[in-house]
Amino acid sequence: MRNTLSADQALDLLGLRAGQSVLVTGAAGGVGAHAVELAHTRGLHVTVLAAPADAEFLAARGADRFQPRDDALAPTAYDGVLDAAGLGAAALAAVRDGGAYVGLWPGREPEAERGIRIAALDVRADGARLAALSGLVDEGRVQARVARTYPLGAAAEAHARLAEGGLRGRIVLVP
C-alpha cells in the first residue's frame, strides 16, 4: 500500500480539480500505475507516458490517453505532471504556465519556471488515508499488479526471481 499512498499524496500535492489534465510519467511503475487509477477516480483527464507494451494495462486502470515514452512530450499541454519516471525538466516542459509539477525524489526536482508550482513527495504515514485507500481496493478501483505468486515454502525461489529484475509487478508469497 506504500505505492498507493505515495500516488495519493503526490496527487494531493498537484492540487488538480476534476476535469483538469494530468500527465503521469513512469505510469506502469508501482507509484505511477496507482496514480493513474487514483487520478481517474478524481475525475482528471489522464495521459500516461510508458512503454507501448503497457498501453492496455494502463487503459484498464483509467488512462484516457497513451503516449509512448520515446515520443517527444507536447510542450505546455497539461495542467499538472506527476513525474514518477524522474524526467525532471523534460516533464516540466509539458506543464502549462501556472500549472503544477510533482516529482518523487526530494532534491531532484527541476527549477520553477513560468509560474509552475514545484513539489517533491515526502510520503507521510497516514492510517486514515490508508483505510480509505483500502476501501478502493475492496471496490476494485485500485488493483495491485502481481507479477507472480509463490507458496511460502518457495520463498528462496521467489527471492532469486526478484534478484533477476525485470518484473512487471510484485511477487507475492502465499501461506
Image (cartoon, rainbow, N blue to C red):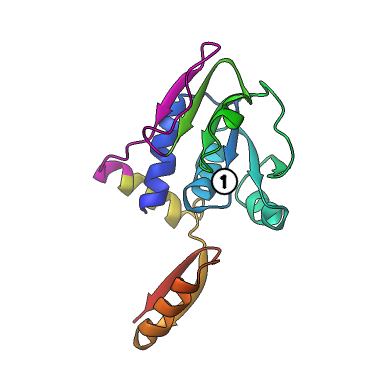
Name which quarter of the figure residue 171 lies in.
Answer: bottom left
Residue closest to the eye, 26 or 111: 111
- At 57% across and 38% down in the image, what residue appears? 24
Q: Quadrant of the N terminus?
A: bottom left
- From what the image shows, is residue 28 above or below residue 109? below
Q: Give coordinates of residue 10: x percent, y percent.
A: 42, 35
The residue tagged 1 is 26
Name which quarter of the figure residue 8 lies in.
Answer: top left
- From what the image shows, is residue 166 above or below residue 47? below
Let me know if residue 128 appears in the view: yes
- At 58% across and 52% down in the image, what residue appears? 28
Magenta-highlighted residues: 105-129
- At 64% across and 56% down in the image, what residue appears? 57
- The answer to whether residue 5 is left or right of residue 16 is left
Q: Give coordinates of residue 56: x percent, y percent.
A: 70, 55
Task: Kindly report the secondary structure that dominates the magenta region of the rendered protein.
Answer: loop
- At 40% across and 31% down in the image, what residue appears? 120
The type of residue carrying mark 1 is Gly
Mark 1 nearby-residue class (10 Å; few <14, some 14–19, many ≥20): many
Whether residue 120 is in magenta: the answer is yes
Whether residue 154 is in magenta: the answer is no
Q: Could you tell me which secondary element the residue under label 1 belongs to? A: loop
Let me know if residue 42 appears in the view: no
Q: Quadrant of the C terminus?
A: bottom left
Q: How many marks?
A: 1
Q: Give coordinates of residue 153: x percent, y percent.
A: 35, 88
Of all residues, the one furthest to the bottom in this rendering is: 153
Q: Give coordinates of residue 133: x percent, y percent.
A: 38, 47
